[in-house]
Image: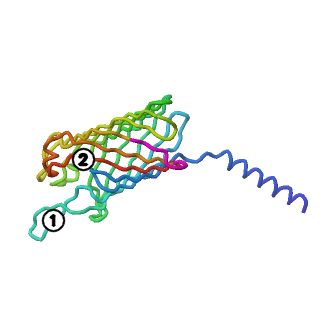
Amino acid sequence: MRKLVTALILLTLSSSALAQEAKPIPSYFRIDQDYLLGTQLWAGATYPLSSKVGLATGVFIVENSPSVTTDAAGGSRMKNSWYGEFDLGPSLTLGPVSLTPMAGIGFDWADRRAVALNVPQLYTIVSFHKIYFESWVWTLLFSPFKNPIASDYIHTRDWVLYKLNDTIGIGPQIEYTYNMNTRGSGTKGTVGMPLGAHIELAFGAGNSLGLFAGYELMKAVRNAAGGNAAEGRITFVHNF
């Protein structure tokens, strides 16, 4: 009996030590609401393969995404979609620089079919003590799935923050969207370029709140919005 109790104690201590040694997989949950796609939900995790290389995964959910359906007369029209995307790619860390190229595929769950490829994507982060830089590049391709309305496009967003302290960072941000072809009433060429300010706030343990307020530089975009030039984004991120 004494040997059994001793064995159970050793097993418990061993399991506890292993649990303390095991590191959680770095992951995040994110909510965006912006001028581009409305409300979006994100989640992702990066599985470490070595000290400098990981496997990044992510999911992206949005309802306000280009989709098309056929009406009773046989014509095409825009509709609300239930869009979900899965992304995968390597994550490379080189000192203060992090590079994550990814490829993704998007599905319209209402139509039960794949509708878009998001490839190539590239996420770049450069972080120093006082300076933080982040850049996104998306290439959304609807044409492989023969969508007659949604245009293929490239979207990029880039910002630099100066960290005033551990709570707040502030700096400029610019975004750019380019339609690579014309479908429906779309226009080939630059279709958006807001320039503005980005504020990042510490928002509790493991949380951050990002605020982007921009002015649309493209006159045609301002005219289409009735002369309104304000564009922006609210972002909440929790890192696990």
Residue at figure coordinates x 67%, y 44% from the top left: 21
The numbered dot on residue 230 is: 2
Measured as percent of width and height from the top left, residue 206 is found at 53, 48
First to last magenta residue range = 199-206
Q: Please identify the quarter of the rendering in which residue 69 is found.
A: bottom left
The kind of residue tagged 2 is Ala
Rendered position, 223 above or below 99: below
Left or right position of 101 against 8: left
Quadrant placement of the N terminus: bottom right
Depth check, mark 2 against mark 1: the one in front is 2
Q: Which residue is mark 1?
A: 70
Measured as percent of width and height from the top left, residue 15 is found at 72, 52
Residue at figure coordinates x 30%, y 46% from the top left: 118
Measured as percent of width and height from the top left, residue 26 is found at 53, 45
Residue at figure coordinates x 33%, y 39% from the top left: 197
Rendered position, 238 above or below 90: below
Mark 2 closeness class: few <14, some 14–19, many ≥20 residues within 10 Å: some
